[in-house]
Image: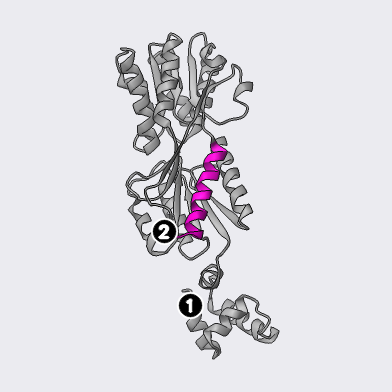
Amino acid sequence: MRNINIKELAKALNLSTSTVSRAFRDNSDISRETKDKILAAAKELNYQPNHYASNLREQRSKTIAVIVPELANNFFSQAIHGIEGVARSKGYHILIYATDDDFEKEVSFIRHLHNGRADGIIMSVSGEGNDPTYLNGLNNKRLPLVFFDRVYEDISAPRVITNDYESSFAATQHLIKQGCQRIAYLVINKNLSIGKTRMQGYLDALEKYGIPFDDHLVVDCTNSYRKNGQILKHMLQELKPDGVFTSVERLAFATYTACHELGVQIPEQLKVVGFSSLEIAPLLNPSLTTVTQPATRIGVEAASLLFKMLEQPGTVNSNEQIVLVSRLIKRRSTAV
């Protein structure tokens, strides 16, 4: 049975659309008898009110949508914390959507938000994105968008990122200075903006120190923990790297697990460094050398940009980019 619209419901009840709309907003000028009649008919005729759209016609929904690839990653948890703090100070709530790195989920969430459920979107894109041009319709819907961390390069929207190239170069350089000559680079999506940028830092560091590039040492991983375990154990046994640089947090943990199962000693046989904002990184055995992004501040800056777009339309350039600085924190996994 198809969903009817508000005009059809009002016609069936011989009421005005404004009366029906006010009833769903529980306005006091509508009698309880009339409200009950409207609600009963809505249920019978399969009408689903769009509260958010009506809110946008009269006032803001006071809600911000936050779309992230995953929630288990400590980086995204901290970024959300930063976003939520700014939103709360503005009297807003946040809705969190996790895509699980699934592009179709991302598209579905954005389309869902077109109905006015949120006043704006803060997004870190999925790892499987192929054609992000579907986002171009957001401008027509007057739904402002800010990217953070993972971005679509072909979409014009403000963004908050970190100095990924410099960080990757510094991490690879650190491994080289610690004596590594066969450094594996672990990546989930080389086509994503951060995948490209971080890999370029790795490649340029190898070139600077005269270490020949071996494409076998660039290891494509997945979003599956089980598959990654198999991939990394095969890498350790067949390629025998003496250093590993992981482009995302989960791959550092997967490396630790694979090493434990194979009896590979960190840092004696393999030195490990990875992007991670995990607060317990110093407590791992051995403690993990990390490139640590200012995750909470990234969230704060992204939310601040979005609210500036909401409160002062036209003052934020669609190409505006804020670049924050990550830190290389040296610990025992690289024999420091």
Identify the image's colour scheme: rainbow, by chain, secondary structure or one colour: one colour
Q: Which residue is mark 1?
A: 4
Discs 2/1, front: 2
**Can see residue 105?**
no
Find residue 209 and report its horizontal and vertical position in percent: 34, 13
Depth order, front residue of 249/163: 163
**Callout 2: few (<14), some (14-19), or many (20+) C-alpha neighbours within 10 Å?**
few
Q: Secondary structure at mark 2?
A: loop
- CB atoms of marks 2 and 1 within 8 Å: no
Question: Crowding at label 1, few (<14), some or many (≥20) Cα neighbours within 10 Å?
Answer: some
Magenta highlight: main SS: helix
Q: Residue at x 53, y 13 (%)?
A: 266
**Callout 1: SS:** loop
Q: In the rendered image, which quarter is residue 42 located in?
A: bottom right
Q: Is residue 308 magenta?
A: yes
* Disc 2 target residue: 314
Q: Which segment did they paint magenta? A: 295-313
Q: Amino acid at mark 2?
A: Gly
Amino acid on which disc 1 is placed: Ile
Residue 243 drawn above or below residue 165 = above
In the figure, is residue 56 to the left or right of 154?
Answer: right
The correct choice, above or below, for 319 with respect to 233 in the image is below
Count numbered badges in the picture.
2
